[in-house]
Amino acid sequence: MNYRKIFFLSIVLFSFYSCVEKSNTSRQFEKSIEARALSADGKEMSTNMLVYYSFASKESKLFDEQGEFIDKKEEGHYIVTPIIRSAVRSIIGRYSPHELSKKDKSELKNEIYDSVISTLKVSKNTDQLEIQIDSISLNKLLFSKAAQQSILKE
């Protein structure tokens, strides 16, 4: 009977210790973001992106220790999503649908990534949550019917 108690206690202590040792800086989060934007000539476009991010600050270790990790993950989403959408609107707004149809997706993704990184560097909204964008994947770039017709005319 004592062995069962010792075994159970060791399991509980081990799981507690493993939670305390990990920090949010070692975890990567994924967020699927859909964003709509207007092209340079006012045609509607939409994108589907996957964003991978992590917390860069050492203070984020407290989130795990206090057991509030999931709430802070959601808070990270609330910071990342508007920044990504703003960058998408800004970048897509520079090009016509015809230019976007010929543009390489990786170039467009890199422009969006650079815009997001520069926004995060100057943003005061992240307070102590220092979010680091690890990568962005541009899954889809969808053209509205008006944008498709504009491409066909050119």
Image (cartoon, helix red, strand yellow):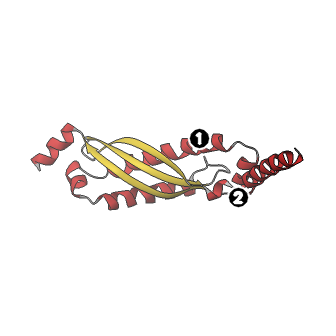
- Percent x, y of residue 87: 42, 50
10 Å crowding of disc 2: few (<14), some (14-19), many (20+) = few
Q: Does residue 44 appear in this view?
A: yes
Q: Are marks 1 and 2 in contact (CB under 8 Å)?
A: no
- Percent x, y of residue 92: 33, 49
Viewed as shown, does residue 15 lie left or right of 53?
Answer: right
Residue drawn 61% across and 49% down? 124
Extreme-left residue of the structure: 153
- Residue matched to label 1: 74
Q: Secondary structure at mark 2?
A: helix
Q: Which is more toward the observer, 108 or 22?
A: 22
Q: Amino acid at mark 2?
A: Lys
Q: Amino acid at mark 1?
A: Glu
Determine which quarter of the picture holds residue 45. top left
Residue drawn 11% across and 47% down? 152
Q: On the rendered image, what quadrant is the N terminus found in?
A: top right
Residue drawn 72% across and 54% down? 61
Disc on res. 58: 2
Q: Secondary structure at mark 1?
A: helix
